[in-house]
Image (cartoon, rainbow, N blue to C red):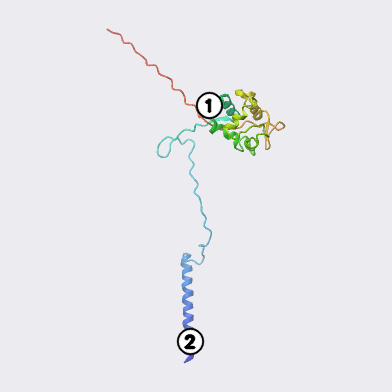
Amino acid sequence: MSDDVRRVIYGTLIGFLAIVVSWLALIYISSCGFTLTCYQASPLVIRTPIPTLIPVSHAESQDGQEMPAFEGCLVSGTNLIGAWVTAGSPESGSFPFTDVNGDACEGTYAEDVQHLFVDSNVWYAGQLGCTSCHNADLTDRSARLDLSSFEGVMMGAQNESILGNGDWESSSLHTVLTAQGLGPDGHDPDAEPVAPIFLYAGMHAAAEEASETPTVTATATP
């Protein structure tokens, strides 16, 4: 009698384990799409769609409105600073300059000139910003010239040779940018001068509308 009970208990346990194994197998297979090869645990590859490039000749936006024209003017960095100096070195307001095509343009100190003194890799690749040496903390060791702000530039301009007192080509800044070489350690008279860099700055000046003189047509009186 005890053997029969033992068989029932063993049979029940074996049957229960078989049911559990079958249930787990069913879950595994169903989670893998009812296949024996499961890739559910593979890394998810996220692909970013390539944006559609708008052709250069595309003059209208998708809503049918005309796209605004690019108004930047192509000019050399040296000539841009020279135009600002020649205009009296204004802090606010615009100053005139001429781009490489001879078109009349306008720029501002804050938007177009200041970054030429502050930013790196402007005059050539690997170049540190002028303010890495010419800043408020190193004015005693850097010709007392602080190029980090408009106020600093004007303080340095009290030495007339730096900005040439409005005569750009006679200024020491013009000499540094055109005759003396620019290197990783600053401007070095022994270094080769760098070719002038060109950048987009300012915008084209608005063309003055020609005033129209009304034409009076005389009629003969019979």
Say which residue label 1 marks. Answer: 95
Q: How many numbered circles does the render carry?
A: 2
Image spot of residue 74 (x, y percent): 55, 30
Contact (Cβ within 8 Å) of mark 2 with mark 1: no
Q: Residues within 10 Å of mark 1 (few under 14, many from 20)?
A: many
Q: Secondary structure at mark 2?
A: helix
Observer-nearest residue: 103 or 157? 157
What amino acid does circle 2 point to?
Arg
Q: Residues within 10 Å of mark 2 (few under 14, many from 20)?
A: few
Residue at the left extreme, as displayed: 222
Quarter occupied by residue 78: top right
Image spot of residue 64 (x, y percent): 40, 37
Q: Which mark is residue 7?
A: 2
Residue at the spot 51% in from the left edge and 28% down from the top edge: 94
Q: Secondary structure at mark 1?
A: strand
Residue at the spot 48% in from the left edge and 91% down from the top edge: 2
Residue at the top extreme, as displayed: 222
Image spot of residue 34 (x, y percent): 46, 66
Observer-nearest residue: 108 or 50? 108
What's the distance in space between the residues labelled 2 and 1, CA to CA?
Answer: 104 Å
* 210 is higher (above) or lower (below) than 7: above
> Relative to 162, is 36 on the left or the right?
left
Residue at the spot 49% in from the left edge and 90% down from the top edge: 3
What amino acid does circle 1 point to?
Phe
Observer-nearest residue: 4 or 98? 98
- Work out whether mark 2 precedes mark 1 in sequence or the reverse, and give the earlier one: 2
